Amino acid sequence: MAGAAPVHPAEAAPDEEAEEAGRLLFAKECDFVAGAATVDALPPDTLPEIAFAGRSNVGKSSLLNALTGRNALARVSHTPGRTQQLNFFDLGNRLMLVDMPGYGYAEAPKTEIKRWNELIRVYLRGRASLRRACLLIDARHGIKDTDRPLMKMLDETAVSFQVILTKVDKVSAGELTRRLDAVHEELRGHVAAHPVVHLTSAHKGFGIAALRAAMTALASPPEPR
Ligand code: GDP
């Protein structure tokens, strides 16, 4: 199927069973576990993990809030002192959600960027429980130069990554199609890229159920009742 355009969730028929499983998981408690600014502070990797990364202002906090139906995650991650950390949240004791620091601020000091890169590289390389990294991309802007170093790092560390377009409510259908084509085209050059691109709007709730379902497939199985 080389070269065939993968179907993205908006085009696929919703899988009701998977979406219900996702709804149930994401309705569970989501507790802050740890904030790590250094490798030593990383919590034990006891649960399957999904990390969220993206440029500052891409809509990461809004998406995490929409997924979990809570403001708590964004509040923790936006607390002064925590914005440059990896913040870990335990979802229902089945999945760890990791909020990575937003990148791309031109004014960030060089030493800060270096420190961030080192922490991320060690984390990505050594984290056995990391099932996937979600790379959030603003649907209005597409993939930018500031995203490319992380994509390269994900290839190098062999961490499966998946692009999630955010704020799709802000673009026309035609623009979205063009943006999606460009993203798929670029992903073909990345060995670690997952072929499915999720389309989401945290504000309108679009694509959230499908994304929850996809993530739930990576979680630990529920405890038998
Ligand atoms: P973060 O810096 O990546 O955590 O981004 P935020 O979640 O704080 O969002 C940045 C800005 O984008 C805010 O003004 C949000 O209201 C806006 N935003 C986030 N998600 C959406 C969305 O789905 N649709 C629209 N129209 N705006 C959004």
Image (cartoon, helix red, strand yellow):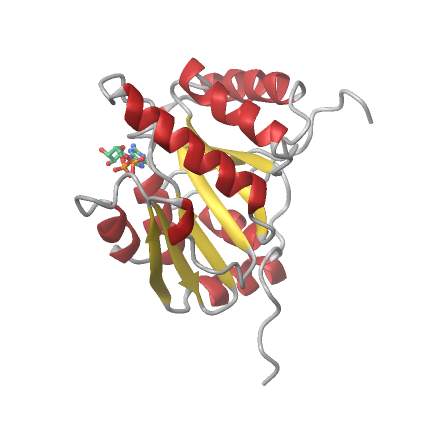
Q: Ligand 1 lies in which image quarter?
A: top left
Regarding residue 169, the answer to whether it shows in the image is no
Question: Furthest residue to the front?
Answer: 40
Left or right of 192 on screen, residue 143: left
**Number of residue marks:** 0
Query: From the viewer's perspective, is residue 138 above or below residue 68?
Result: above
Q: Name the foreground residue: 117 vs 106.
A: 117
143 horizontally vs 213: left or right: left
Q: Say which quadrant the C terminus sits in.
A: bottom right
Q: Nearer the viewer, residue 116 or 48?
A: 116
The x and y percentages for residue 8 are 61, 35
* Residue drawn at point x = 29 percent, y = 58 percent: 70
* Residue 125 on image: x %, y %: 57, 39
State whether residue 145 is above or below residue 196.
Answer: above
Extreme residue toward the bottom, this view: 225
Residue drawn at (39%, 38%) of the image: 201
Residue lying at the far left in this picture: please name it: 80
**Measured from the top left, where is residue 113 in percent x and y?**
34, 25
Q: Residue at point 25% right, 55% down? A: 71
Residue 225 appears in the figure: yes
| Residue beneath the point at 50% across and 18% down | 179
Q: Which one is nearer the viewer's eye here, 32 or 156?
A: 156
Picture coordinates of residue 105 (x, y %)?
27, 22
Question: Split into 4 quadrants, where in the image is the N terminus?
Answer: top right
The quarter of the displayed image where residue 160 is located: top right
Which quadrant would residue 203 be assigned to in this image? top left
